[in-house]
């Protein structure tokens, strides 16, 4: 309803205005009648109003003086002037003050007044709608700003240890946006995140994270509890009230159903203080590590002493080398299978996954040692399922993935061994290999190598692959990466210097290529092998 105040000192005029227009029928609410400006201001002080119909000539305070006060105190109120023929000077002043229109009392017809009022009513509604839209935009912007700010603050609180005072101040500042204590802290991880990014099914990594976050927020709104923070590496942290398992289970189901992505949660509770959030996140992250041994449970609660600080021993190096020398493929595959089964037996302490990975890397090393004794190179074996052994061991999500891949790779290993034993590359190919070994740090062309041995480039490429089992490019990369591994063990050589020394002007490209083979970036490789 549009609220209207009638200001007129003549009783008969007021009576006529009240009676010959059905105000309520046309969406108006008459909030009162005033005989002059002073009377009108007293009514406006107590009641809200949208539209003022006022005479100009009145005792005590005339319409012009009233309009000046209304413009100062209630600028949103629109005004319709009632005037006589001799009031045109006042009307002009009223229009200057912002009156929407005027009407002559002596010639006024109900339909004319009604038309003007409805036009003004439409203007009022339109302005009201715009004001509401502006308010909504402001509320949304404020809410968005708060969400962005609290997300950053919570991310910092999860990833860095705040002082107790800093944590308490943060909790007080965002009291209304956070659930009451005690909290459940959860860490979610997208399974095989790097592979999902490489598939490019979501067009970009940013769109992938955005899609996941939308699903998580929608479900959290449904449960009306908590807050979500985007982390790195396909991880998302969240705080919620106690008893969060049903919500987390629904999140895993919805992300699987709508985005076709498997995800896992590690949880820790109860958290009684904001100061404890950083440590709680560490516990939740540790719970996620159980995924390495068991992928059936999608929501994993933290337990004390979940993992042991030591890994199961493996057979001696001589036993593995002996099986390789006898080319006993089945025995080697069973040894890999038995080791994986041993880690999964009930009652056996399960080591931290990184300790278990070191055991598997030790097994890969046995194959490497055997090939070196034969004058070969582990990295010259054609990638199995597009992957290299070190990359698989360091990046696989579960112990089953590692063991199953190695079991399949052992067949490729023996095929490579037989091929390299039976067949040695012809002299021209060996010459090309020597040239690549000499020129690997420079930007040479394959066509130049072909000229050196009097072959066309296509023929040399085909022959090189046939004779060695790998392309010239792969052979060059292998030589470069071998030198890179040597250089990375020297802490005085910077990463970009390593890249430049082996022929890569772009350190980022070198880092990505290195990770594809080793499963870790050059900087991490250096840390592991220096310290």
Image (tube, rainbow, N blue to C red):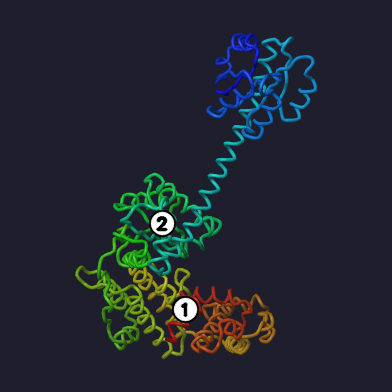
Name, please, the residue furthest toward the left.
347
- The quarter of the image holding the N terminus is top right
Image quarter for residue 302? bottom left
The residue shown at (39%, 52%) is 226
Tag 1 residue = 524
Q: Is residue 378 left or right of residue 112?
A: left
State left or right for residue 514 relative to residue 86: left
Identify whether 483 is placed above or below 114: below
Q: Is residue 207 above or below residue 443?
A: above
Foreground pick, 455 / 365: 365
- Which residue is depicted at the point 58% across and 38% down? 133
* Mark 1 vs mark 2: in front: 2
Q: Which mark is residue 308?
A: none
Counting the numbered discs, the total is 2
Q: Secondary structure at mark 2?
A: helix
Quadrant assignment, res 479: bottom right
**Going by the picture, which residue comes out furthest to the front?**
60
Disc ID at residue 172: 2
What whole-number distance in Å separates the C-alpha atoms at marks 1 and 2?
39 Å
User: Disc 1 or 2, which lies upstream in sequence?
Assistant: 2
Please state the horizontal and vertical placement of residue 145, each as a whole percent of the image.
53, 53
Q: Nearer the viewer, residue 494 or 112?
A: 112
Badge 1 density bin: few <14, some 14–19, many ≥20, Cα 10 Å = few
Q: Residues within 10 Å of mark 2 (few under 14, many from 20)?
A: few
Q: Split into 4 quadrants, where in the image is the C terminus?
A: bottom left
- For image coordinates 37% across by 67% down, the residue present is 164
Q: Residue 306: percent from the left, percent from the top?
A: 26, 69
Q: Secondary structure at mark 1?
A: helix
């Amino acid at each position: 309803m549009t609220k209207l105040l009638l200001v007129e000192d003549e009783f008969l005029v007021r009576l006529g205005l009240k009676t010959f227009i059905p105000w309520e029928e046309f969406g108006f609410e008459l909030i009162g009648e005033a005989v002059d400006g002073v009377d009108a201001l007293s009514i406006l002080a107590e009641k809200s109003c949208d539209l003022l119909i006022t005479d100009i000539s009145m005792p005590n305070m005339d319409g012009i003086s009233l309009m000046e006060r209304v413009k100062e105190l209630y600028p949103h109120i629109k005004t319709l002037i009632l005037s006589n023929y001799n009031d045109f000077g006042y009307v002009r002043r009223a229009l200057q003050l912002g009156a929407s229109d005027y009407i002559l009392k002596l010639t006024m017809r109900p339909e004319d007044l009604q038309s003007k009022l409805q036009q003004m009513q439409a203007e009022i509604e339109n302005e009201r709608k715009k004001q509401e839209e502006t308010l909504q935009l402001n509320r949304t912007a404020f809410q968005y700003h708060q969400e962005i700010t609290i997300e950053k603050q919570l991310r910092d609180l999860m990833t860095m240890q705040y002082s107790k005072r800093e944590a308490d101040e943060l909790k007080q500042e965002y009291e209304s946006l956070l659930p009451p204590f005690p909290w459940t802290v959860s860490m979610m991880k997208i399974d095989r995140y790097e592979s999902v990014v490489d598939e490019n099914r979501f067009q970009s990594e940013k769109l992938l994270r955005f899609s996941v976050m939308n699903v998580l927020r929608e479900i959290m709104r449904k449960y009306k509890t908590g807050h979500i923070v985007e982390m790195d590496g396909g991880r998302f942290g969240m705080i919620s009230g106690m008893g969060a398992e049903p919500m987390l289970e629904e999140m895993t189901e919805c992300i699987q159903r709508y985005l076709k992505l498997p995800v896992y949660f590690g949880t820790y509770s109860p958290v009684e203080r904001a100061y404890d959030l950083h440590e709680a996140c560490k516990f939740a992250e540790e719970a996620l590590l159980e995924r390495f041994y068991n992928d059936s449970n999608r929501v994993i609660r933290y337990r004390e002493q979940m993992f042991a600080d030591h890994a199961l021993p493996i057979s001696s190096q001589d036993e593995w080398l002996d099986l390789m020398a006898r080319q006993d493929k089945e025995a080697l595959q069973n040894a890999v299978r038995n080791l994986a089964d041993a880690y999964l037996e009930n009652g056996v302490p399960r080591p931290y996954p990184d300790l278990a990975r070191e055991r598997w890397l030790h097994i890969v090393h046995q194959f490497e040692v055997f090939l070196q004794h034969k004058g070969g190179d582990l990295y010259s074996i054609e990638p199995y399922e597009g992957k290299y052994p070190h990359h698989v061991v360091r990046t696989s999500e579960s112990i089953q993935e590692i063991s199953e891949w190695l079991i399949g790779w052992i067949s490729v290993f023996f095929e490579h061994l037989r091929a390299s034993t039976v067949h040695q590359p012809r002299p021209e190919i060996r010459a090309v290999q020597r040239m690549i070994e000499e020129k690997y740090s420079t930007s040479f062309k394959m066509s130049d190598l072909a000229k050196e041995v009097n072959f066309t480039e296509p023929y040399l490429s085909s022959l090189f692959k046939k004779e060695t089992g790998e392309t010239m490019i792969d052979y060059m990369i292998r030589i470069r990466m071998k030198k890179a591994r040597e250089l990375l063990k020297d802490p005085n050589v910077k990463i970009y210097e390593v890249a430049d020394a082996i022929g890569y002007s772009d350190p980022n490209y070198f880092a990505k290529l290195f990770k594809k083979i080793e499963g870790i970036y050059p900087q991490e490789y250096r840390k592991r092998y220096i310290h």
